[in-house]
Each structure stands twice: as C-alpha cells, then as structure tokens.
Amino acid sequence: MNFPIAVTNVKLNQLDDSWSGMAQLSGQDQAYKVLIFKRDESYRLISAYCPHQGLDLTNVPIENDGNLVCPFHGWRIGVFCQNAMSYVVERQGENFVVVSEET
Ligand code: FES
C-alpha cells in the first residue's frame, strides 16, 4: 500500500474529536467512508462500516480501552490499543492524511 493517502470530503461528526471522510484503503478498489478519531494528540482511522455485517459506525464512541464496540452485535474494533485495526493519520490543517497502518 502506498502512503500517504488523502482523506477527502472530511466533516466533523456529532461526537467530539471524530470526523467522517472518504479514503481508498488496502484491498479496496474505490474510496469508501472512513472514520477518524483523536485521542491526546494522535489520530487513527478505521472503515466506517463494521467488519461483521457492515453497520455504519458513525457517531459510535471509542471506549476508554481504545476499542469501538459495534452496537449491533458487540464486535470490538481496535482503534487506540494494541493489535489495533486502525491506520495512523496526520492532521494537516483542516485535512487528514493516512500515513501508515497501525502495527
Ligand atoms: S454488524 Fe457490527 S457486530 Fe454485527
């Protein structure tokens, strides 16, 4: 995967420190909706859709342990934690750029 990847059509969500946008991530043939979260001074990005059955996770908050818990069936999606499924994002003014996968 070639980084950096620009996130387009960014808009602030209802939650504090959460944005929606569009990005073409690994294994995708087109841009899909993504979510960006901020914790301290770090930004992470995940697909906006639950990997289980695709529920849109916009406006679902991050738990204190760094996971987002899908309200449909309870799958836990690592955002700010070990073994996270997220991408590292940098903020550049009002824009966001995906710089790497979380390792
Ligand atoms: S759709 Fe998210 S846990 Fe099932």
Image (cartoon, grey):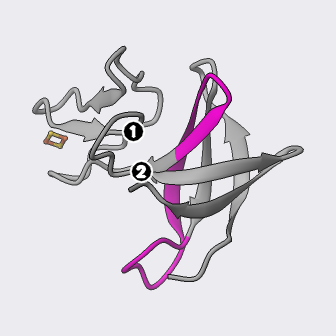
Disc sitting over residue 48 in the figure: none
Nearer-the-camera pick, 39 or 19: 39
Disc sitting over residue 79 in the figure: 1
- Residue 36's place in the image compared with 52, above or below, is above
Quadrant, the C terminus: bottom left
Q: Which residue is at a point 42% across and 21% down the rendered structure image?
A: 61
Q: Which residue is mark 2?
A: 86
Q: Which residue is at a point 53% across and 43% down the rendered structure image?
A: 44
Three-letter code, disc 2: Ser
> Alpha-carbon distance for marks 2 and 1?
5 Å
The total number of labels drawn is 2
Q: Indicate whether residue 88 is drawn in magenta.
A: no
| Label 1 within 8 A of ligand 1 by Cβ | no
Residue 62 percent location from the top left of the image: 40, 23
Q: Which residues are magenta?
A: 24-44
Asked if the residues shown at circle 2 and circle 1 are in contact, with their CB atoms under 8 angstroms apart, the answer is: yes
Residue lying farthest left?
73
- Ligand 1 shown in quarter: top left
